[in-house]
Image (cartoon, rainbow, N blue to C red):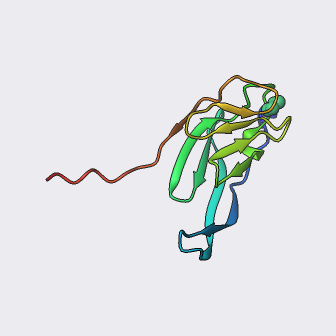
Protein backbone atom coordinates (compact mmCIF):
# COMPACT_ATOMS: atom_id res chain seq x y z
CA UNK A 1 0.00 0.00 0.00
CA UNK A 2 1.51 3.40 -0.93
CA UNK A 3 2.46 5.86 1.80
CA UNK A 4 -0.12 8.67 1.76
CA UNK A 5 1.09 10.52 4.85
CA UNK A 6 3.81 12.64 3.22
CA UNK A 7 3.52 15.53 0.80
CA UNK A 8 2.52 14.78 -2.76
CA UNK A 9 5.46 14.20 -5.09
CA UNK A 10 6.55 17.34 -6.85
CA UNK A 11 7.64 17.47 -10.43
CA UNK A 12 10.64 19.62 -11.10
CA UNK A 13 9.41 22.98 -12.23
CA UNK A 14 11.58 25.25 -14.28
CA UNK A 15 11.00 28.95 -14.56
CA UNK A 16 12.71 31.40 -16.83
CA UNK A 17 13.22 34.91 -15.48
CA UNK A 18 14.03 37.84 -17.65
CA UNK A 19 15.37 41.07 -16.27
CA UNK A 20 16.66 44.19 -17.90
CA UNK A 21 20.19 45.16 -16.99
CA UNK A 22 21.55 48.62 -17.59
CA UNK A 23 25.24 49.01 -18.42
CA UNK A 24 27.30 51.96 -17.24
CA UNK A 25 27.25 53.19 -20.86
CA UNK A 26 23.44 53.42 -20.63
CA UNK A 27 22.75 50.39 -22.83
CA UNK A 28 20.10 47.88 -21.81
CA UNK A 29 20.17 44.15 -22.30
CA UNK A 30 17.82 41.36 -21.27
CA UNK A 31 19.35 38.84 -18.88
CA UNK A 32 17.74 35.41 -18.75
CA UNK A 33 18.10 33.36 -15.58
CA UNK A 34 16.70 29.84 -15.21
CA UNK A 35 15.47 28.60 -11.85
CA UNK A 36 13.94 25.33 -10.68
CA UNK A 37 12.87 23.61 -7.48
CA UNK A 38 12.99 19.84 -7.11
CA UNK A 39 12.06 17.55 -4.21
CA UNK A 40 15.03 15.35 -3.29
CA UNK A 41 14.25 12.74 -0.71
CA UNK A 42 11.62 13.17 1.94
CA UNK A 43 12.76 16.38 3.64
CA UNK A 44 14.97 18.28 1.23
CA UNK A 45 14.64 20.31 -1.94
CA UNK A 46 17.19 21.33 -4.55
CA UNK A 47 16.96 24.84 -5.94
CA UNK A 48 18.82 25.78 -9.09
CA UNK A 49 19.31 29.38 -10.12
CA UNK A 50 21.38 29.85 -13.23
CA UNK A 51 24.58 27.88 -12.61
CA UNK A 52 24.17 27.92 -8.81
CA UNK A 53 22.60 25.14 -6.78
CA UNK A 54 21.27 25.05 -3.21
CA UNK A 55 19.74 22.40 -0.93
CA UNK A 56 17.21 23.35 1.73
CA UNK A 57 14.65 21.87 4.09
CA UNK A 58 11.47 21.17 2.15
CA UNK A 59 9.18 22.47 4.91
CA UNK A 60 8.98 26.15 5.83
CA UNK A 61 10.09 26.82 9.43
CA UNK A 62 6.93 28.90 10.01
CA UNK A 63 4.07 26.40 9.66
CA UNK A 64 5.50 23.73 7.39
CA UNK A 65 4.50 25.10 3.98
CA UNK A 66 5.82 23.00 1.10
CA UNK A 67 8.74 24.96 -0.27
CA UNK A 68 8.87 22.65 -3.28
CA UNK A 69 5.90 24.74 -4.42
CA UNK A 70 7.69 27.96 -3.50
CA UNK A 71 8.46 30.88 -5.78
CA UNK A 72 12.13 31.46 -6.58
CA UNK A 73 13.31 35.01 -7.12
CA UNK A 74 16.38 34.44 -9.27
CA UNK A 75 17.53 38.05 -9.18
CA UNK A 76 17.54 38.26 -5.37
CA UNK A 77 18.36 34.60 -4.67
CA UNK A 78 15.31 34.05 -2.48
CA UNK A 79 12.59 31.44 -2.14
CA UNK A 80 9.11 32.42 -1.02
CA UNK A 81 6.82 30.04 0.84
CA UNK A 82 3.48 29.54 -0.93
CA UNK A 83 1.51 29.41 2.34
CA UNK A 84 2.09 32.75 4.13
CA UNK A 85 4.72 34.23 1.83
CA UNK A 86 7.78 34.33 4.06
CA UNK A 87 10.85 34.64 1.88
CA UNK A 88 14.28 33.28 2.67
CA UNK A 89 17.74 34.10 1.39
CA UNK A 90 19.22 31.14 -0.47
CA UNK A 91 22.70 32.28 0.52
CA UNK A 92 22.16 32.60 4.29
CA UNK A 93 18.75 31.08 5.06
CA UNK A 94 17.73 34.35 6.73
CA UNK A 95 13.98 35.05 6.79
CA UNK A 96 13.87 38.29 4.84
CA UNK A 97 10.13 39.00 4.74
CA UNK A 98 6.92 37.46 6.09
CA UNK A 99 5.56 36.30 9.42
CA UNK A 100 8.59 34.31 10.62
CA UNK A 101 12.07 35.30 11.73
CA UNK A 102 13.18 31.68 11.97
CA UNK A 103 15.81 30.97 9.33
CA UNK A 104 15.56 28.23 6.74
CA UNK A 105 18.20 25.49 6.83
CA UNK A 106 19.90 25.95 3.44
CA UNK A 107 23.37 25.47 2.00
CA UNK A 108 24.91 26.10 -1.36
CA UNK A 109 25.97 22.94 -3.18
CA UNK A 110 27.32 24.52 -6.34
CA UNK A 111 30.35 22.62 -7.54
CA UNK A 112 33.13 25.01 -8.32
CA UNK A 113 36.26 24.31 -10.29
CA UNK A 114 39.35 24.21 -8.15
CA UNK A 115 41.39 27.40 -7.94
CA UNK A 116 44.35 27.34 -10.32
CA UNK A 117 47.70 26.82 -8.60
CA UNK A 118 50.36 29.35 -9.56
S1 LIG B 1 4.20 28.22 6.40
FE1 LIG B 1 5.67 29.30 5.26
S2 LIG B 1 5.29 31.35 5.76
FE2 LIG B 1 3.84 30.25 6.92
Instruction: Say whether residue 93 is left or right of residue 100.
Output: left
User: For the point 22% across and 54% down, which residue is it?
Assistant: 116
Q: Determine the residue positioned at 82% across, 38% down.
A: 85
Q: Where is residue 80 in the image (x, y as percent from the top left)?
A: 75, 42
The residue positioned 68% from the left and 55% from the top of the image is: 12
Q: Which of 61 and 30 is in front in this view?
A: 30
One can see residue 12 in this view: yes
Question: Is 80 displayed left or right of 56 in the figure?
Answer: right
Residue 1 appears in view: no
Q: Quadrant of ligand 1?
A: top right
Furthest toward the right, the residue is 84
Q: Which residue is drawn at 59% across and 74% down?
A: 26
Q: In this view, does 35 lie to the left or right of 67?
A: left
Residue furthest to the top in view is: 102
Q: Is residue 22 above or below residue 75?
A: below
In which quarter of the view is residue 45 placed? top right
- Compared with 15, 52 (above or below) is above
**Most foreground residue, 75 or 59:** 75
Q: Where is residue 117 in the image (x, y as percent from the top left)?
A: 17, 51
Location of residue 57 (image quadrant): top right
The location of residue 84, given as percent across then percent down, is 86, 34
Residue 49 sits above or below residue 17 on the image: above
Q: Quadrant of the N terminus?
A: top right
Image coordinates for residue 98, horizontal then vertical, percent: 80, 32
Q: Residue furthest left?
A: 118
Amino acid sequence: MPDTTGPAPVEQESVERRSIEQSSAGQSRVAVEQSSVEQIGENRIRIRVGDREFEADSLCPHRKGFLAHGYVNAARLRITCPLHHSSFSLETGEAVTGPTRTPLCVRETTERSPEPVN
